[in-house]
Amino acid sequence: MLSSRRRQQRLEQEQADIEHEIRVLQSRPSINRTDGDKSREEHLVCRLVEIVRLRDELVQQIDAERRRERQEDLAIAANSDSNSSSIKSSDVVAPVKKNKVKDKVKKQLKKAKHSLISKKKDEDKKQNK
């Protein structure tokens, strides 16, 4: 669980760094952008998509681990002889909240894709003029 948290933090930091670099590249006027800049931006967006996918997998793994732990707690409570020390099943089986991290990651991915698409459309319009 601790390694998952560290990995999640590392991916979050890498995502923030990449998003910053993409914003810097996109802030330049298209006239001043080189083919290398465009290539770098495409590479960064691809890496951003990969990071989002990895974070999503990590969130799913963490959720699965939490569900497994919850089931173990229920099994222990069911096997317990003492009523005073047993855990009520209604206390353990709380509804699982939708993971906000997963939603945030998906929103960021959509935003990055939209930004790239709109930037390319703008460049195409300027080149056609």
Image (spheres, rainbow, N blue to C red):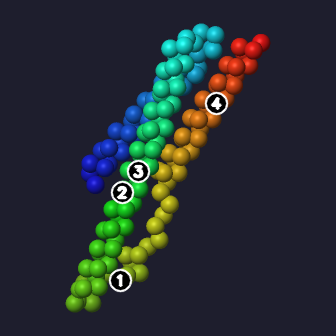
Circle 3 crowding by C-alpha within 10 Å: few under 14, some 14–19, many from 20:
few
Circle 4 crowding by C-alpha within 10 Å: few under 14, some 14–19, many from 20:
few
Contact (Cβ within 8 Å) of mark 3 with mark 2: no
- Determine the CA span between mark 1 and mark 4: 52 Å
Q: Does any portion of residue 97 appear in the rendered image? A: yes
Residue 112: x percent and y percent?
A: 56, 35
Contact (Cβ within 8 Å) of mark 4 with mark 3: no
Mark 3 or 2, closer to the camera? 3
- Return the mark for residue 57: 3
Element type at marker 1? Answer: loop
Horizontal arrangement in the rendering, residue 101 relative to residue 27 (left or right) = left
Residue on which disc 1 sits: 88
Horizontal arrangement in the rendering, residue 64 relative to residue 39 (left or right) = left
Horizontal arrangement in the rendering, residue 62 relative to residue 30 (left or right) = left
Q: Amino acid at mark 4?
A: Ile
Q: Is residue 11 above or below residue 86?
A: above
Residue on which disc 4 sits: 117
Element type at marker 4? Answer: helix
The tag earlier along the polypeptide, 3 or 1, is: 3
- Determine the CA span between mark 4 and mark 3: 26 Å
The tag earlier along the polypeptide, 4 or 3, is: 3
Q: Residue at coordinates 43% horizontally, 39% vertically from top-left?
A: 51
- Determine the CA span between mark 3 and mark 2: 9 Å
Element type at marker 2? Answer: helix
Q: Residue at coordinates 41% horizontally, 44% vertically from top-left?
A: 54
The tag earlier along the polypeptide, 1 or 4, is: 1
The tag earlier along the polypeptide, 2 or 1, is: 2
Residue on which disc 2 sits: 62
